[in-house]
Amino acid sequence: MPPTGLKLANPELNIVVFSGDGDLFAIGGNHFIHAARRNMDLTVICVNNLNYGMTGGQVAATTPHLAKSTTTPIGNPETPFNLPLMAYACGATYVARWTMLHIRDLTDSITEAICKKGFSFIEALSPCPVNYGRRNKQKPLDMLKLYQEKAIIKNDADPSTLDIDFEKGIILGKFIDLDRPTFIEQYDKIYRPSRLQENVPELNS
């Protein structure tokens, strides 16, 4: 994840990453996993529109089971990722999910995540009316209405229960807020010059 390099080069920077679900959890999935595992001091906001909305509407790692896309014209046979669960399992210290309709909650969450030390992750659900909506027979206003009617705000919910289910409801809220040392703190603790002088013979010769 390039922001990891930016943060290491200049730890004083406040780095916020905006990415789509396809780019972040398919093409860039490995980068996400290790940035969270290391607890890099980054804020990552995933704009999840359930498909590769800007490159043709292909199936993504977040496309619901049986949903249609350009590459799954009769329905997606795969099970999608539960993004909050993945972020938590990889080591994120702050995890939340909101929709673009919950603008005040989302704004507050972004502010909180930026101020939080460590790897913060926010999933922002945002409908894609052209590629996803058209293929799944959902009109733009109907998609917004779905997000409004199916939203269930449940802070501190168990991440394993956060699969997106448009039938049962979509759980929103702040789920994880933990404290643990960041990568830079751990690195400095081990590799600070005084420590190296004590433990690396080559430096003392």
Image (cartoon, rainbow, N blue to C red):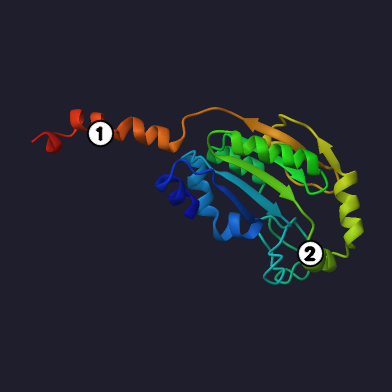
Q: Residue at x 66, y 42 (%)?
A: 84
Residue 78 placement (x, y as % from top left):
68, 58
Mark 1 and mark 2 lie on one chain; the one further toward the N terminus is 2
As drawn, the label of residue 132 is 2
Instruction: Indicate which label's residue lies in the foreground, 1 or 2.
Output: 1
Residue 13 placement (x, y as % from top left):
50, 44
Kind of residue indicated by mark 1: Pro
Q: Residue at x 80, y 47 (%)?
A: 165
Q: Is residue 193 left or right of residue 142?
A: left
Q: Residue at x 65, y 35 (%)?
A: 112
Kind of residue indicated by mark 2: Tyr
Residue 80 in view: no
Q: Is residue 109 left or right of residue 67?
A: left
The front one of 81 and 190 is: 190
As drawn, the label of residue 52 is none
Residue 75 placement (x, y as % from top left):
77, 64
Q: Is residue 112 left or right of residue 8?
A: right
The front one of 63 and 186 is: 186
Q: Which residue is mark 1?
A: 193
| On screen, residue 12 above or below 58 | above
